[in-house]
Image (cartoon, grey):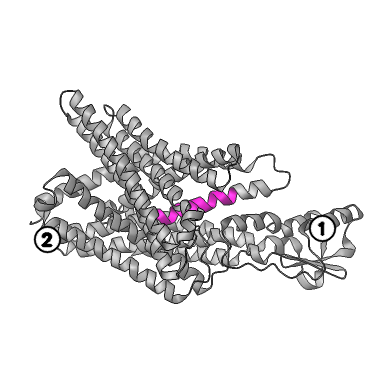
Amino acid sequence: MISVCGFVYAALVVVVSVEAHVPVEQQTLTASGHFLRAGGNVFDLDELPPQSQLALEKYIEKLQLTPHAQPHEHGHEHGHEEHGHHHGEHGAVGESIQGLGLGEHPEEHGDLGHEAGGAESFALACFLMGGVAAQMFLFYLVNNKELETATWRVLNMTVSIFVAVLLYGTIKMTIIEFFKPDFYALIGITLAMFVLFFVGTHALLYSMMRGDPTQLRAAGTIMAHITGFAGMYGFADCKEIDFFEELSGFGILLLIMVTCFVIVSMCYVMDNIMDRTAKASGGVDEDEELWMEICNETDDDVFCLAVSFLTVLYIRYQIRGHVMPYEPGKVGDVQQEHCTKLLLVSIVFALLVFAGQMVIMKYHQVLSSTEFNKRCVANLQHLNSMLMAWSFLFWAEWQLYVIGWERTVMGATLLLALLLTLLSFTGVVVFTFIREHLHKKLAKRAIGSLEVALGVLAGFSWERAFDVGFEEIEHSFAHQHGSPIPGYAAVTLLSFVLLLIVFPAWRYHILPKSILLEETEEKKEDRFVDQ
């Protein structure tokens, strides 16, 4: 109970801090008579030092602002790229004006320094307190015997996705910076990365086959995420190609079929290569069996990630009546009825996850009679989990803007990530309570499958927040006047430093702990739970 209150407190302070921060869209510059209004502050032009007059004229001319200029209107359709552009032009209006040596009109605003930095200081203070509350909340969960397995599972999934986002985003940003491709070339590069990652993952796992099993599983997990991101975004961006765009919704359906065919064909080729490699060695030993198992799990994750994302894009098309961008913040003229329909879809997929696990356990012998049947059933269950997660995530984003969110895209993604993580851990608490009062292994496994789906939801929400966050950093450095560090170099350096901190912690602590707890729980259920 204390841990839940701690996370609620953390979420609330984040909401307050985002509300307190002056939104980018409202930072405007207006000149009238002897006074200048910038970002909510009023400056006396008569107090402007002579050496700053020319700088002020050039600054206003650069922003293309006239006296009595009206604030720039921003619709919900603006995506992250447009947001970053306006942030570079207007985000530092107040700071730039202060740098010109202007004096503030004392009768209206009082102390300039306190007023200018008040909103930022308050936001940082709220994040400080919220961060402490979130850490303590996590401390309670990982030390709770009933919740620790599910907690470590969600942590494992979320942090592994974070590591994959760092690697994939850095690689793609570097390629874009050096080659500067147009839209169609970028699609080709992304799909080429997908193929290279897919083949390279199998080569990497083969080279690690005789080594540490945990190391093998760690490599498979990270590479599955990276390859899945490349395939997911590569095939999704194809919907904007003229041929698919003219087909509208049918174009997305065609892309889903093409994606399934391509990935299944690649999996078939790799399976044959693995079988021939194992037979050439005179039989399948334990190391080769584990290697083939992890390779299959990696391929399945890639397939489910790409197909589930495209499928939800098609569902969104059916609800809205036209093809929608998938980038955060690009929600268009969304209505409450659209949100309600997408929420119902996510609930349907959640029920399918629960029912699917019940069917798997009840008809286990029939469904696992062959290795092919077993793999198809596992993929269907995993696919439903990801469909539920994507549907719920997009519903939450739509609902936030329907409620009236008019702040930054970064604030929206961060808030959604926190709230959906809170929802996921709350679900874990509820499901754990239900599991303790169940006596059938069938129902217990079905509940456990829903916990996995909640972990996927939390991971996806943070993936979008991480993605937007690094784009924000890149745009800020790119548009910061006089910055000696290029935007892509700053993000690359930051990604490298974070990898040095996060990856060892995940590889040597979070992943082994998660594997150990899940194996212990599975053995415990096999021993003490009635069939």
Mark seen at residue 424: none
Q: Residues within 10 Å of mark 1 (few under 14, many from 20)?
A: few
Question: SS class of the residue under badge 1?
Answer: helix
Q: Which residues are magenta?
A: 458-473
With 261 as the anchor, is 478 left or right in this view? right
- Please state the horizontal and vertical placement of residue 417, each as a whole percent of the image: 44, 59
Q: CA distance from mark 1 to mark 2?
A: 73 Å
x 41%, y 43%: residue: 226
Viewer-side residue, 76 vs 246: 246
On whether residue 305 falls in the magenta region, the answer is no
Check disc 1 and report the residue beneath it: 61
The image position of residue 485, as x and y in percent, is: 66, 39
Check disc 2 and report the residue beneath it. Answer: 440
Q: Position of residue 283 (x, y in %)?
A: 15, 26
Name the image quarter holding the N terminus. Answer: bottom left
- Magenta-colored stretch includes residue 469: yes
Say which quarter of the image contains residue 93: bottom right
Q: Amino acid at mark 1?
A: Glu
Q: Which mark is first along the chain, 2 or 1? A: 1
Depth check, front residue: 219 or 431:
219
Identify which residue is drawn at 18% across, 57% down: 445
Give the vertical position of 479 relative to 422 (above or below): above
Q: Which secondary structure, mark 2?
A: loop
Q: Amino acid at mark 2?
A: Lys
In which quadrant of the rendered view does residue 28 lie?
Answer: bottom right
- The C terminus lies in quadrant: bottom left
Closer to the camera, 165 or 333? 333
Would you identify the image quadrant in which residue 392 lies? bottom left
